[in-house]
Amino acid sequence: MAISKAAMPDIETDDIRQRHRLIFAIMLPALAENLLSSLVSLADTAMVSVVGDAAISAVGLVTQPRFIVFSAFYALGTGASALIARSKGKDDRREACTALTQSVLMCLAISLLMCLVMIFWAEGLIRFIAGANIAEDTIQMALTYFRIQIWGFPSLGLTAIINGALRGTDNTRAAFTSNAVANVVNVVLNYLLIAGNLGFPRMEVAGASLATVIGQCAGLVVSLSIVCRKKEFLYIRLGGPMKPNGLMLKRIWRIGFPSLIEQVIMRVGIMAFTIIVTSLGDDPYTAHIIAMNIQSLSFTTGMAFGTSSMTLTGQSLGRSRADLARWYTARSNALGYIVSFLVAALLFFGGTFLAGLFTQSLHIQMLAGGVLRIIALANPTSNARFVYNNALRGAGDARFTAVNTFVGILLIRPLVAALLVYVFPIGLTGVWIALISDAVICFFLARIRWQRGKWALIQV
């Protein structure tokens, strides 16, 4: 359900409490969405563990190819969201709806292309990531999981685009509703299909993958039902003319292309990073996957406050109020720090216990708990990075975030990881020291860029 214009204060209000209300009106549904997604990811990992620790590793191997595909949708959604946020700030509904329609058309073309590419490259890509030290049974499970995922690319992409567009208009509740439906369907079907409960067939990792795809389709139905309502600020007529608009596609591409480069760089860097981790063998890689799932939960507050900073920055610049963009971003960052310290304490003291929810192996539990203490130390800084980077994206400064990602994920993270795994062999601990090195350096680069203020002059 959309938040009515009358129910929300104007972004230019001088009342600090009302400004806080705006931040939380965007942040809380985004936080709920992020938490739900992370919890469902945790539930997926825990539920598939009934097949064995190898199944956890298999699903983890598919994460990177899946995110390579999602990177294109994320980039496109970033371009659409930045434009729509400015349109919202100017109260230009027609421009916002045009941006959404053109983004949907581009998404359909990209998703079909990705399906074709991955059908032919799936096995080679999975084997490349797995390397020589991951068992063949694990690789075969990963291939089974990924081949089903391919057919969910169109629904995954369209949902991401529509939900990103809705966030640009403050409507984070709609995106939460869509993802909530998708995730609930996913968990229910996981229960039925992984182990064959209530008379359903036991499909193991194939059942987990099928549950995810069906859940994505359910989420897409919800998202489409929202943007097909004429009363919404964003509206799309599925039965009407949907012709390419060269000018709008160019504007979306101007922001989306640097974001695409950023995402490709990030995925290549993470893939190189993953190859280093898989070289450590099955147990360290399983511990790494468990820790990454738990870590994703710790990032939800930073991502949620990042959503508020991106949306309010775009809307403020739509009214030529860079001062408001600075205020909203600074306050989002300050509020995010408070929560991040609490989450960091939970990870530091309770990491091993959390890892025990996924595996009975004490060795894997200790490995995962150890690296979670490392990430706890950098959690506040890592979350602040999301706020600054998303604020820059909201301003249209996607080129910088691409460069920042290149420095952190393609250079710092894999190089430090390789040094601490192969030269100074400290195993999985070295991998996670590399991970927080990347996060801290990227935070400082983004903060300096924001403070210099060149983003306020960007035209989109």
Image (cartoon, rainbow, N blue to C red):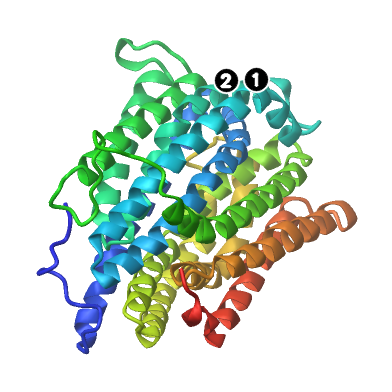
- Name the residue nearer the viewer: 383 or 425: 383
Residue labelled with disc 1: 140
Amino acid type of disc 2?
Thr
Residue 184 x, y percent position in the rendering: 30, 36
Work out whether residue 39 can be spotted.
Answer: no
Amino acid type of disc 1?
Gln
Q: Residue at x 24, y 53 (%)?
A: 234
Q: Residue at x 59, y 82 (%)?
A: 448
Residue 115 x, y percent position in the rendering: 54, 28
Q: Residue at x 31, y 79 (%)?
A: 319
Q: Secondary structure at mark 2?
A: helix
Q: Which mark is residue 352?
A: none
In the image, is 292 to the left or to the right of 151? right
In the image, is 422 to the left or to the right of 252? right
Give the crowd class for mark 2: few <14, some 14-19, many >=20 residues within 10 Å.
some
Tags 2 and 1 touching, CB below 8 Å: yes
In the image, is 420 to the left or to the right of 343? right
- Name the residue nearer the viewer: 228 or 414: 228
Give the crowd class for mark 1: few <14, some 14-19, many >=20 residues within 10 Å.
some
Residue labelled with disc 2: 144
Residue 70 x, y percent position in the rendering: 52, 43
Q: Secondary structure at mark 1?
A: helix
Q: Is residue 274 above or below residue 402?
A: above
